[in-house]
Amino acid sequence: MMKIYSRQAILMLVCTLVALGASAARKDAYDRSRIFWDTDTKKTLFNIGNYARMIQLADGRLMVAAENGGIKVIYSSDGGKSWTPSELIAPNPANVSECVPDLLQLADGTIVVGYNPRPREPYSTDRRFGIRCRRSTDNGATWSDEIFIFDAQHTFADGCWEPSFLELPSGELQCYFANENDFTSTNEQCISMCRSFDKGLTWSAPVRVSYRQWTRDGMPVPILTPDGKEIVVIIEDNGWPGSSGFIATTVRTTIEDNWSGPYVDATSTRRSKIFATQPPARHAAGAPYLRVLPSGETVASYQGNDNRSTTDMERMNMSVLVGDEHARNFKGLTQPFNISDSQHSLWNSVAVVDTGTVVALGSIGQVGSANRIDMIKGYPRRNLIARRGTPNINGTAAKDTYSYPKAYQIILGHENNTRRTMDFLYDDQNLYFTARCIDRDIIDDKADNDGVTLYLDLENACDVYPRNGMFQFFFDVNGTFTMKHGEDLAGYDAGKWIANDAAGLAGVQYKLMRGSTYYEIEAAIPWSVLGLDNAPTERLMRADVAVRNRHETSIEYATIVDTSTASSKPNSWAWMGFLLMPGESGVEAPAVGERELRIACTGSELSLSSSVAMSRVEVVAFDGASVASHIVNGTSCTIATGGTACGIVRVSFADGTVQCKKWMR
């Protein structure tokens, strides 16, 4: 039965709800990169195979090792566009399968490929489950004979599994693996590690890294944190109370301890789930992998049931998240591969190549059938940028030079293979925005047509409500556009959207180009329409986009991960940072109240000093890529520039404010 309320009652209810939310409107800014997956880079590497792992060699080539009738390797000299024929470097012995490779190029150039011999039935004591490796000292041209690392028992129930390597700054090479050898009367499993001090030629006996009684720590992958202080190993852990399966977990030790002290047990503070937010009950997150981004952030993958209707392992998909520089607080979940409910993506991994591109590799197939190995590239962005430039506003970016090649700064739609790309430019008069959207059923005759929404928060308000300095533009495929601005509600820590009339839109240009299966837009937004006299090159702002795809009976949105499409509560705290890149070199020193921030560049380091305490410093290249970051607790610090010659320093102060400053060598 429909209930009808008086206008006065509704007004009182709205005021009450606003008042209740007043104390929690503003939030800390989202502090992690988001990954944009590019379906144009998707490629099948092996028609049949599992457990693919990738590294980039010192000569720039990409190298992949995979399980495919033994251990095979392939190489690419063009960033993954084409690959060499596969080379078998570890053939299967009689009645044994060589499985689960991992690979690493050492500081001296030696390439080490490890793998896991798994005997097949009938078992015999002369064929044991083990860990082996092979070495190449000539960049992969030739390979050594098999090198022994460890042997477990000869039966499946008491074997060892899944090697993974880490080289320490001292030159020590470590091989981590899951180990059942010590638990012949139970189903338990621990993580063990063997050491090599001669580049993988000989190996020590194993030490125990982690063990949770009565459960199965498994599938370890190690990293060294960017500050060089901790060894962190991501594992799958099926012993967390309340969980129904494996959960991606980290165990850790200091570089000084280096696993010489007690192992990480069930109650250790050195064991923790990876997630910034507690996952729901019955969440599954097994077979994890871990790597470090050039920004210092970390990236993890696992096979899980995110957005799946089942906890059945055979129907899991690959998920990828971004963590902080300590390999904690992972968020920004994306799923690189678009697969149906009858498919899975298992035994996945991630690699970090070039200047920070993330490559996801997955074993993809129909349940019950053989898998193929696919790759796809993703681009982590912590901030969005606009370079200085003036495009021709004609509805397409095709002949313009936007901030990123092909205007591909933002890439959305990989979840359903419907590609949408966006980018920005600016000059003294305007902010420019362009988008290209694949759409095979363009709808332009409804109240809520297809189109693209651009959100701007020029004041970095980081709010859950529309506020002063916030703007919303919707570019409709029918060739029209609307604009709204945020307005504070007097007396409340809240705000609302106000639609701009025609006079408030004066000077905004919008051009549309449509094809049968796509549409493109270009827009010029005068700074004066945004309440500014000139381009705000010294501000950290925030921006967001959302693509509305209208169907006859439903609407779907393509959005940046962890942002919101709710118009009444836009959550600008989760929008991406937005910076205007300078068109000229030099260092400028904007004042913030009585604050003074000084920067000096010496070689490959920046020295910073401030009149007030800093909490975090980040070096950002002019292309928006985060080069380095550093946690600070004081008024001075030094930070590496990562070989870049110029860029932006973003300083977060202890009082919660942020200042950006340009620098050059």
Image (cartoon, rainbow, N blue to C red):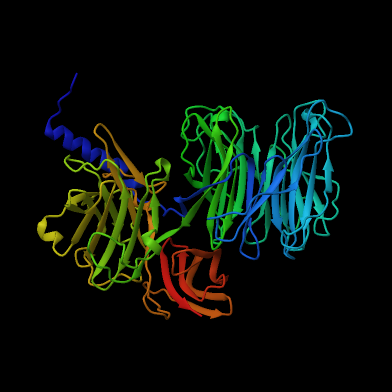
- Residue 376 sits above or below residue 9 on the image: below
Left or right, residue 75 beside residue 614:
right
Location of residue 441 in the rendering, given as x and y in whole percent from the top left corner:
27, 40
Location of residue 591 in the rendering, given as x and y in whole percent from the top left corner:
37, 75
Q: Can you name the residue that lies furthest to the right here? A: 126
Left or right, residue 484 beside residue 455:
left
Location of residue 488 in the rendering, given as x and y in whole percent from the top left corner:
23, 53
- Residue 563 sits above or below residue 109 on the image: above
Q: Nearer the viewer, residue 443 or 165?
A: 443
Left or right, residue 392 beside residue 54:
left
Quarter of the figure with residue 216: top right
- Residue 447 sits above or below residue 612 on the image: above
The structure residue drawn at horizontal position 82% and vertical position 49%, both measured from the top left corner, is 146
The structure residue drawn at horizontal position 29% and vertical position 54%, both measured from the top left corner, is 455
Q: Can you name the residue that lies furthest to the front here? A: 85
Location of residue 566 in the rendering, given as x and y in whole percent from the top left corner:
30, 43
Q: Nearer the viewer, residue 539 or 321?
A: 321
The structure residue drawn at horizontal position 70% and vertical position 52%, both measured from the top left corner, is 103
- Residue 410 sits above or below residue 16 on the image: below
Number of labels in the image equals: 0
Quarter of the figure with residue 119: top right
